[in-house]
Amino acid sequence: MDRRKKIYLGTNTKMYKTTAQTVAFLKRLNQLTKDISRDRMELFVIPSYPSLAAARESVPRQSVSLGAQNMAWEEEGQFTGEISPLMLQEAGVDLVMVGHSERRHVFRETNEEENKKVLCALKAGLSPLLCVGETAGEKGFEIAEEVIRTQLKIGLYGVMPCEARKIRIAYEPVWAIGVNGVPASKEYADQIHTVIRRTLTELFGAEAGGDVPVLYGGSVNPQNAEELIWMPGIDGLFIGRSAWDADNFNAVIRKVLPVFEEKRAGGGCRMKPSQLYALNESIRDLDYVLAAYYLELPKEADVVEKAAGMAMGQTIGTWVPVPGITDEMREKHMGKVVNIIDLPPCDLSTQVQTETAAYLIQLAYPVSNFGAQFPQMLVTLLGNDASTSAQVKLVDLQLPRSFVGEFRGPRFGIEGLRRLTGEPERPLLLNMIKPCTGFTPDVGAKIFYETALGGVDFIKDDELLGNPEFCPAAQRVKAYGKASDAAYEKTGHRAIYICNVTDRADRVLDNAKRCVEAGAKAVMVSYAAVGYSVVRALSESVGVPVLAHYAGSGPLFEGVASGLSSPFVTGLFPRMAGADLIMMNTPYGGYPLKYQKYIQAAHQMSLPYYHLKPSMPIAGGGVHPGIVERYVKDLGTDMILGAGGSVQGHPMGAAAGARAMRQAIDAAMARVPVENAAREHEELRAALERFGRDG
C-alpha cells in the first residue's frame, strides 16, 4: 500500500442511525460516488454493531469499507457485552476503530488495552484504525506531542514493520471533536501529523513508517476540509457529523479529492516552463502588462526564484502552494517571467565583487486579472505583500492596446484647451492664488481680479485650499467669476478659474457638480490624494477640463527600492485617467528631480500614445520670467507655465507680475533674448532684477 496514491475518507456514525437508516445512507453514498475510482480513494464507514451485517450486504466491499467502533482483545471468552474479531470478520468488517477518545475518556480504556486490541485485530486480519489525541488540558500544558507519542508507542508496541502497512492512524484532538468541538487550525494539525509520522518512522523504519496513512479528525466540515487535506502531512479525513448525510459527505469528497490529487502531483509548484516563463517576442502583442522592476539581492540569492515568486505571488500564488490551482488557471491567470538583466551586465559569478547584486526583472501580468481599472492593476503591480516579499521599484511599464483602449483619457486635451483660451500657439500662463489658504471668497476674488488684469490664461486654487467652511468652493466660483468678468471688460482677455474639488472620494464628484453649476469652466484635483480612479470618474462626468495636481505624489516614487518611476506617477497615469492639464515638478524649483525624469514625465503626458489625446504639461515650482526660455527649449510651446510667487510677489504687484511673464513668453516665441526684451518692458525688467536669469 502506498498511502500517497489515494485519499482516505471515512466517518463514524457513533450511536446514531438504525440499521435501516444505515443501509439507506450506504446505498445513497455508493450511488453518488460510483463514478470515482477506488484507486483514487479509500472510503470507509463505521456504523453501530447491529447494522454491520446488513450494511455489508447493501454495498460492495470494493466500494465502501466497513469498520467496527470497538472490539475486545480476545477472540472469545467470558466478556459480557463485548464483540470479538472473529464475529466482526463474519459480519464482513474490514477495519476496527481502536482508542477513540470516548473509549479512552468515557470508558477509561488505557494505552495498554488499546495495544492489546491492535495486536488482536492484526492477528484476525483486520486493519486497526488507532485513534490518538490530546485533551485541552494537555495541550494547554504543552505536552500534546509527548501524549501522542506515548499513545503511539504503547498502542503499537509489538507490531512488526511488515504489519504496519495494515494500520491506519487517526489524529483526533479531544478538544476538537463533538458538538462543542473547536476545529484545529490546519497548521497545528499538520504539526501534530509531522510528529506522528516521525514516531511511526522511529517504530517501523522510513519505508514502512512512511506508508502508514495518517488521517485528521476533529470538527472537519465543508469549510475547512480543503485546507486541511492540502497540508503535507494529512493523508485523509475522519469526518463526523458533516458526513452523516450521504449528499453532504459526497460534497466534501468532491471538494477534497481534486485538492489532494493536486497536492500529490506537486501542488502549485510543479508546472510547465511555458506557464511561468515567456520570451518578450512571444508575449508583447498579447493581453499582458509588461512590468520591469529594479531589484537588489544578496549576491548568493537566486534571482530566478525571486522573479518566479513575484510572478506567482502577484497573480495566483501565495507563500505556500494552495489547493485548486489548475493548468488552465496557470495558463490564463499566472504571471510570467520575461527577462532578467544583471546590473552591471555580468555573465560569470566571479564578476560580482560586491555583497549585493542588482537586476532588472521583467514580468508579464494577464490583463484579465484586473481589467481596465487602476486599483487592481496597481495592487498587482505594486502589491509587494508577504507573498512577494521583494523590495522592488517599478521602472518600466508597457500596457497593451486592448487595455489602454478601455480608458477614454483627456476629454479636451491640448487642442481643447487652446480652443477654450483662444490661444493657438504660445505657451499658456497659469497662476495660483497666494496666500494658499485662510481667506474668504471675497478676499480671494480681489487677488483674482488683480492677477487677471495682467493677462494670465488660468488662475487656480492652491492645492491646500479645498472646500473649507470659511471659503466654500462653489462660493469661490461665483465670486471669482465676477472678478474674471470685470477684468475681461477692462483688458479683453479672459482668465479662467480652476477650482480645487479635492475631498473625500465620495464628495469629489458632488463638489465638481456644484462648482460647474456655479459657473466653473475647469476643476482641479490632487490625484495622489484621491486616487487615479476618482480622477477618471471626475473626467468622465464633469464636462469641463480637469487639472491633475501632483501634490502628495512624492512617496509613490521617491524610494529607490519601492514604488514606481515618477513618469508613470506624474505623467502617464493622470493622462490615462483623463486629466487635460497635469501639474508637474521640475528640476529648477529646488526639488531634486532628475532632468531626464522631468522630460520623460512630459513625454508621457504629451507624446502620441495609442488613441489618448495629449495632456498639457504645467511646469510648476520656481517659474519666473528669467527661466521661460529654458522651459520652452525643454518642453516646446504646448505647455503651461505655472507661475506663483513670481506673479504674486512681483515688486510692482500681481498684474505686473503676470505681464512680466507674458512678456517673457512673447520674447521666447519671437526668439528674442529675455534681456533684450526687458529693455522695452518695465515689468519684465523688474522681474529679472528680482528673480534673476536662469538658463
Image (cartoon, grey):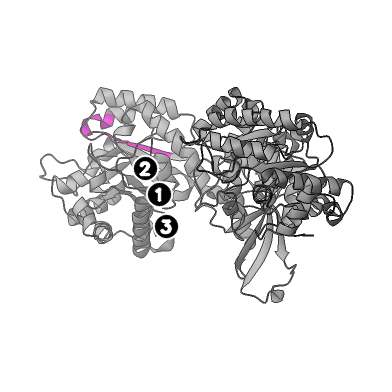
Image check: 575 left or right of 251?
Answer: right
User: Mark number for residue 210?
Assistant: 3
In this rendering, position of residue 134 left or right of residue 431: left
Q: Earlier in the sequence, mark 1 or mark 3?
A: 3
Work out how far the residue at label 1 is from the one at label 3, CA to CA, in angstroms: 12 Å
Going from N to C along the chain, the mark reached first, 3 or 2, is: 3
**Residue ID at (65%, 34%):** 497
Image x and y of residue 685, in percent: 78, 54
Residue 234: assigned label: 1
Task: Answer few, some or many: residues within 10 Å of disc 1's Cα (few below 14, many 20 plus, some between 14 and 19).
Answer: many
Helix, strand or loop at label 1? It is: loop
Q: What residue sits right under mark 2 in the picture?
A: 237
Instruction: Please give the range of residues in magenta.
Output: 42-53
Which residue is farthest right? 671
Q: In the figure, is residue 471 to the left or right of 341?
A: left
Q: How far apart are marks 1 and 2 (CA)?
A: 8 Å
Asked whether the viewer can see residue 280, the reply is yes
Residue 623 x/y as whole percent: 71, 52
Please name the amino acid that badge 3 sits on: Gly
- Residue 147: percent from left, percent from top: 24, 58
Q: Is mark 3 on a helix, strand or loop?
A: helix
The reply to whether the C-beta atoms of the residues labelled 1 and 2 are less than 8 Å apart is yes
| Residue at x 59%, y 43% (from the top left corner) | 462
